[in-house]
């Protein structure tokens, strides 16, 4: 009887740990973002050096929302600020900043790929924790 309880308890703890690990992995992977630039409504439509760009308020909001999705993933940040828009060109970079632990931290942002219609491209970008 004790052996069955022990096997069940170990199995239950293992299952909970596996589910917790999967949830952590899913939420931690949210540092990769996708943004489609829609030029029709003229809202959040900007250009940098003649190229379409992801508006900096979109960068700030996404980083603020996903930088710290769980207490054990990333730092608790606030006051995210990006100095410029992110050019919709693969390899383009920008460095945003945020307040954390009483100081400012740098958050590098990089465009991974740009695909789709050039008039309304889908920009895949990533921020570093």
Image (cartoon, rainbow, N blue to C red):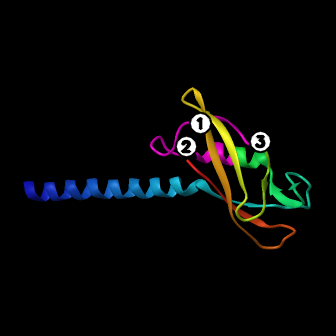
Identified at 77% across, 42% down, the residue is 83
Along the viewing direction, whichever of 66 and 81 lies nearer the viewer: 81
Q: Which residue is mark 1?
A: 77
The kind of secondary structure element at disc 2 is loop
Find the magenta span and give its range: 62-82
Q: Earlier in the sequence, mark 2 or mark 1?
A: 2
Q: CA distance from mark 2 to mark 3?
A: 21 Å
Dividing the picture into quadrants, the one containing residue 115 is: bottom right
Dividing the picture into quadrants, the one containing residue 123 is: bottom right
Could you classify mark 3 by the number of other residues whose Cα lies within 10 Å: few (under 14), some (14-19), or many (20 or more)? few
Q: Are marks 2 and 1 in contact (CB under 8 Å)?
A: yes
Q: Is residue 103 above or below residue 121?
A: above
Q: CA distance from mark 2 to mark 1?
A: 7 Å
Q: Position of residue 99 (x, y in %)?
A: 62, 32
Q: Earlier in the sequence, mark 2 or mark 3?
A: 2
The kind of secondary structure element at disc 3 is loop
Q: Which residue is mark 3?
A: 83
Q: Position of residue 85 (x, y in %)?
A: 80, 50
- Check residue 81 for magenta coloring: yes
Q: Which residue is mark 2?
A: 68
From the viewer's perspective, tell me whether residue 15 is left or right of residue 114: left
């Amino acid at each position: 009887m004790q052996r069955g309880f022990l096997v069940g308890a170990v199995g239950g703890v293992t299952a909970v740990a596996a589910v917790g690990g999967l949830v952590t992995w899913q939420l931690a992977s949210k540092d990769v973002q996708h943004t489609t630039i829609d030029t029709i409504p003229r809202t959040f439509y900007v250009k940098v050096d003649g190229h379409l760009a992801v508006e900096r308020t979109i960068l700030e909001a996404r980083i603020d929302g996903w930088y710290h999705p769980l207490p054990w993933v990333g730092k608790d940040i606030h006051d995210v600020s990006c100095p410029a828009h992110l050019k919709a060109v693969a390899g383009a970079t920008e460095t945003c900043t945020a307040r954390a632990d009483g100081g400012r931290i740098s958050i590098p942002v990089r465009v991974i790929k740009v695909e789709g219609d050039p008039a309304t491209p889908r920009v895949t970008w990533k921020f570093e924790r």
